[in-house]
Image: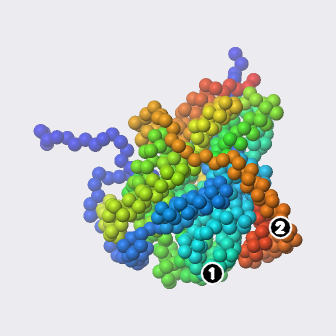
């Protein structure tokens, strides 16, 4: 049995918003749960995030947006992943995102969106269940 | 004794939200160490524990100042007028992320963000529309803006000139607290040293030319929202304040010439007594620093005047109407803590920017506290409580330990370079989240009393056309300018940045010649370089 590589997750803050409490907590919770975590830091463009994900051979990207710019930013990350042939990377995210937008973003390929009040265990469980390490 | 009932305590943690252990009962013994004069003084007198003014709310109620901003300048202008019509007593402006980070609406980095988290501003044209028909000599205006605060102040002064209002009559506050940006809110252009230099330019400039304006609002709010404890919020905020005082003194300013206009901004979270104690401890500590460390002579220099806001971080997306109750209790704590100004959050803000209905409930909450409850009829009604006085002393002592550590590092800029406050806050945020995940800390509707979600609430939508419209308008406006004048002003600004001249007079001329916020920020980027954060999580 070949040992599976550890699942690798990029936690990213796209756009200009500086609210990073959630992103840092999620990054740390995923790290503590045994995943390999790359946190991009703040103010990343979608291009920078996708480049990081490809360079780090990430299996998933968690995007945190609290500025209301989620519709543009999530969509742009998905487009760029497709352009680079990396659409197998699982996209999930969280932030201040109203229900209508959650439904619309899921329809275009965002796997899951978490709103304020989500426990870190739920996010860890989501990554365990939905993200497999690329071989 | 046999036959007597054994009184058992509930199996919960008896400690404050910040982890200060609580005794079952506080008695005169707990406060025996200090005299009332040393601990409390009189309202309006050193050390200001009981409040910064002799009459407090009997003289004048706190300013009800609701933070508002979204969409185009005219959208926010309409919300301002609505709030003033509803009895609000001061304005507070929220800018969108591009304005806060130094990009015009037509910059590629602004895509998707224009008018979303606040009002979109690129040029003086936008600022004029934002304050159209609002008499700047009669309202006070607070602006939550930091690395581009110098531009916003210049635009505000230019609008005042156009309205014919003398600068001496202008009252208001720029947030302009760059140190806490590096620690918590994370909006920046250049590194801490040049950032603090611009703040100091503004402190110096307003002290001379806009004497009723608060050039900086030293803010714990964002520190707390980033996940700190109440003690950390208290300590890091005061340490930031000391940083600005040191910078202004190094500029050669006299302490009593600028200290009276330094203002503060604290978060008011769920732990009722801890938050009241925090405000009282903050006043006492600041007064002592000003008097003893810096030799301030004027009582006004020693007064810690503070805006407050209920804790956004405590609001829940689940059962959103519960936030109305949280906000009411937090607002009561702000008032019992002696705040000068208060913003109450709206119950729908975990979903989007607030609707007019939600904002109205939030404003009415303050009006109910002010007009119905009677808590504003006497000064510092909780003063002398064995418990509250003990807690105030404990918070002071714990915060002082942090400040001693920061002093030992050489002040806040060095502490930030070391990642010290950032790491302390990230650790506290994570600890808090784990406690909530384990159920050690209860959040009603989230980890206890959970309900299947009901029908979603109404929320505010920003029309996608706002962005397109603002981009077009900005581009059109810029194309119609006299570019030779703009370029000359930007060159003068770059020179002032390089040779240490005060940037403010140059900026006022620059915005009047329609140099944009993004162009001015580009000068800062070119001259001072970009800040890169240490990655700490």
Q: Is residue B492 above or below residue A74?
A: below
Pointer 1 or 2: first along the chain: 1
From the viewer's perspective, tell me whether residue B301 is left or right of residue B467: left
Task: Report x, y in % for residue B459.
Answer: 55, 45
Q: Residue at x 57, y 59 (%)?
A: B79
Comparing A39 with B59, the one in front is B59
10 Å neighbourhood of mark 1: few (<14), some, or many (≥20)? Answer: some
10 Å neighbourhood of mark 2: few (<14), some, or many (≥20)? Answer: few
Comparing B151 with B196, the one in front is B151
From the viewer's perspective, tell me whether residue B177 is left or right of residue B382: right
Q: Which residue is mark 2?
A: B481
Q: Chain of mark 1?
A: B
Q: Which residue is mark 1?
A: B166
The extreme right residue here reads: B484
From the viewer's perspective, tell me whether residue B431 is left or right of residue A94: left
Q: Is residue B167 above or below residue B447?
A: below
Which structural element holds mark 1? Answer: loop
């Amino acid at each position: 049995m070949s040992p599976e590589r550890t699942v690798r997750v990029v936690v990213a803050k796209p756009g200009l918003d500086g609210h990073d409490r959630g992103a840092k907590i999620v990054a740390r919770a995923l790290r503590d749960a045994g995943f390999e975590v790359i946190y991009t830091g703040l103010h990343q463009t979608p291009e920078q995030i996708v480049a990081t994900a490809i360079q780090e051979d990430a299996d998933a990207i968690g995007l945190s947006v609290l500025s209301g710019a989620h519709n543009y930013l999530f969509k742009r990350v998905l487009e760029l992943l497709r352009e680079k042939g990396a659409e197998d990377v699982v996209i999930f995210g969280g932030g201040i995102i109203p229900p209508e937008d959650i439904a619309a973003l899921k329809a275009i390929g965002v796997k899951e969106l978490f709103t304020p009040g989500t426990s870190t265990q739920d996010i860890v469980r989501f990554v365990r269940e939905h993200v497999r390490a690329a071989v | 004794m046999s036959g007597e009932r054994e009184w058992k305590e509930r199996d919960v943690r008896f400690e404050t939200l910040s982890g200060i252990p609580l005794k079952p009962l506080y008695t005169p013994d707990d406060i025996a160490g200090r005299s009332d004069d040393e601990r409390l003084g009189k309202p309006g007198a050193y050390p200001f524990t009981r409040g910064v003014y002799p009459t407090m709310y009997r003289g004048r109620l706190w300013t009800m100042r609701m933070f508002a901003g979204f969409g185009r300048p005219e959208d926010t202008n309409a919300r301002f007028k609505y709030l003033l019509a509803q009895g609000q007593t001061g304005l507070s402006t929220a800018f969108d992320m591009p304005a806060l980070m130094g990009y015009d609406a037509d910059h590629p980095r602004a895509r998707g963000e224009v008018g979303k988290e606040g009002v979109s501003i690129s040029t003086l044209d936008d600022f004029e529309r934002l304050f159209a028909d609002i008499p700047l000599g009669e309202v006070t205006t607070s602006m939550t803006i930091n690395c581009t605060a110098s531009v916003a102040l210049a635009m505000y002064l230019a609008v005042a000139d156009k309205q014919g209002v003398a600068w001496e009559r202008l009252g208001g506050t720029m947030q302009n607290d760059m140190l806490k940006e590096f620690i918590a809110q994370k909006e920046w252009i250049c590194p801490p040293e040049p950032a603090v230099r611009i703040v100091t330019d503004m402190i110096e400039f307003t002290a001379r030319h806009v004497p009723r304006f608060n050039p900086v609002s030293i803010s714990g709010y964002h520190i707390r929202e980033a996940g700190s404890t109440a003690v950390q919020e208290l300590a890091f905020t005061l340490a930031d304040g000391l940083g600005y005082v040191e910078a202004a003194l190094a500029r050669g300013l006299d302490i009593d010439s600028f200290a009276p206009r330094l203002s503060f901004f604290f978060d008011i979270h769920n732990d009722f007594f801890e938050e009241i104690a925090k405000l009282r401890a903050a006043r006492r500590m600041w007064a002592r620093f000003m008097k003893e460390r810096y030799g301030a002579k004027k009582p006004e220099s020693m007064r810690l005047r503070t805006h407050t806001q209920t804790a956004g971080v405590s609001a829940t997306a689940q059962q959103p109407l519960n936030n109305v109750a949280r906000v009411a209790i937090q607002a009561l704590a702000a008032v019992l803590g002696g705040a000068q100004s208060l913003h109450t959050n709206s119950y729908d803000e975990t979903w989007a920017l607030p609707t007019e209905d939600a904002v109205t409930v939030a404003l009415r909450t303050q009006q109910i506290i002010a007009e119905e409850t009677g808590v504003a009829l006497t000064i510092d009604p909780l003063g002398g409580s064995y418990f509250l006085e003990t807690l105030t002393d404990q918070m002071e002592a714990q915060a002082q330990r942090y400040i001693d550590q920061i002093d030992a590092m050489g002040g806040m800029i060095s502490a930030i370079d070391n990642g010290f406050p950032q790491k302390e806050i990230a650790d506290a945020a994570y600890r808090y989240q784990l406690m909530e995940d384990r159920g050690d800390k209860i959040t009603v509707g989230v980890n206890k009393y959970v309900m299947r979600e009901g029908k979603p609430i109404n929320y505010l939508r920003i029309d996608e056309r706002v962005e397109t419209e603002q981009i077009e308008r900005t581009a059109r406006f810029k194309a119609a300018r006299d570019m030779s004048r703009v370029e000359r002003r930007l060159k003068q600004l770059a020179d002032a940045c390089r040779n240490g001249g005060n940037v403010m007079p140059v900026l006022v001329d620059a915005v009047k010649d329609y140099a944009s916020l993004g162009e001015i920020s580009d000068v800062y980027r070119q001259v001072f370089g970009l800040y890169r954060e240490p990655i700490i999580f």
